[in-house]
Image (cartoon, helix red, strand yellow):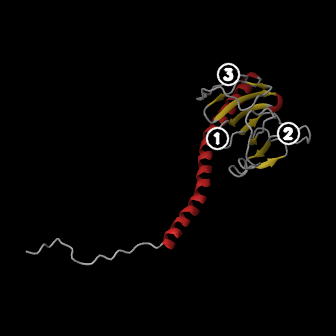
């Protein structure tokens, strides 16, 4: 009796050539080289979005406090906003600032005068963009050598460098964070740090 399930024909197997495999590997490599930097930018923008939301909330609460009391707040406890970060790392050592609150990536500080004027700063304290920051100031940040000022009551991006009261040195090229990721325009202000006006 003949088994109907038996395969009795010849099996022809076609395989990829070495050239075809090399082309596929090359294409995958090119796609990865293009996609990885874009992915890293998207991750950084996502982390920054959370910090920027907190920065805006703290600044608005500080402005409300100033309108109600006639002076800028000196403590987060005076604000009507909850800061979920429990660390105490400072992005910058300011001459007049509250103790910062931080998470693993960011530190937020109230500036009450001195080099950073009056305002709120949120700075990157870890990762490849440590030393970068965002700030909204209520008084001008003036460069003593040029007399130019960073915008007031507008969010600015900062690429900070140690030696300018910044505890974290921005180790990448100027513009790698504020211009390439956030489309900022350089403002000729700051001694060592670089300020960028955001669109």
Q: Residue at x 70, y 25 (%)?
A: 65
Q: Residue at x 46, y 73 (%)?
A: 17
Q: Is residue 71 left or right of residue 126?
A: right
Q: Is residue 114 left or right of residue 78?
A: right
Q: Is residue 155 left or right of residue 17?
A: right
> Looking at the image, is mark 1 or mark 2 earlier in the sequence?
1
Secondary structure, mark 1, is: loop
Q: CA distance from mark 3 to mark 1?
A: 31 Å
In the picture of the structure, the residue carrying the numbered disc 1 is 127
In the picture of the structure, the residue carrying the numbered disc 2 is 191
- Residue 154 got which mark? none
Q: Residue 23 at x, y = what percent?
A: 53, 70
Do residues under tags 3 and 1 come within 8 Å of each other at their CB atoms? no
Secondary structure, mark 3, is: helix
For residue 87, say whether it is visible: yes
Q: CA distance from mark 3 to mark 2?
A: 32 Å
Q: CA distance from mark 1 to mark 2?
A: 24 Å
Q: Residue at x 74, y 26 (%)?
A: 66
Q: Residue 1 at x, y = what percent?
A: 7, 74
Mark 3 vs mark 1, foreground winner is 1
Q: Residue 36 at x, y = what percent?
A: 59, 54
**Figure quadrant of residue 140:** top right
Q: Residue 29 at x, y = what percent?
A: 56, 62
Give the answer, above or below, for where 49 lies relative to 37.
above
Give the answer, above or below, for where 134 lies relative to 13.
above
**Figure quadrant of residue 162:** top right
In the picture of the structure, the residue carrying the numbered disc 3 is 78
């Amino acid at each position: 009796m003949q088994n109907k399930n038996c395969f009795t024909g010849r099996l022809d197997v076609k395989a990829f050539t070495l050239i075809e495999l090399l082309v596929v590997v090359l294409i995958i490599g090119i796609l990865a080289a293009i996609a990885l930097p874009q992915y890293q930018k998207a991750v950084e923008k996502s982390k920054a979005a959370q910090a920027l939301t907190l920065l805006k909330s703290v600044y608005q609460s500080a402005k409300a406090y100033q309108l109600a009391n006639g002076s800028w707040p000196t403590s987060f406890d005076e604000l009507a906003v909850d800061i979920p970060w429990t660390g105490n790392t400072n992005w910058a050592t300011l001459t007049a600032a509250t103790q910062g609150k931080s998470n693993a990536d960011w530190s937020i500080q109230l500036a009450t005068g001195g080099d950073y004027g009056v305002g709120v700063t949120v700075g990157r304290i870890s990762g490849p963009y440590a030393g970068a920051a965002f700030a909204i100031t209520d008084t001008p940040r003036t460069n003593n050598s040029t007399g130019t000022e960073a915008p007031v009551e507008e969010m600015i991006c900062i690429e900070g460098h140690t030696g300018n009261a910044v505890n974290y040195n921005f180790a990448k090229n100027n513009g790698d964070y504020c211009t390439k990721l956030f489309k900022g325009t350089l403002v000729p202000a700051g001694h060592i740090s670089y300020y960028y006006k955001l669109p």
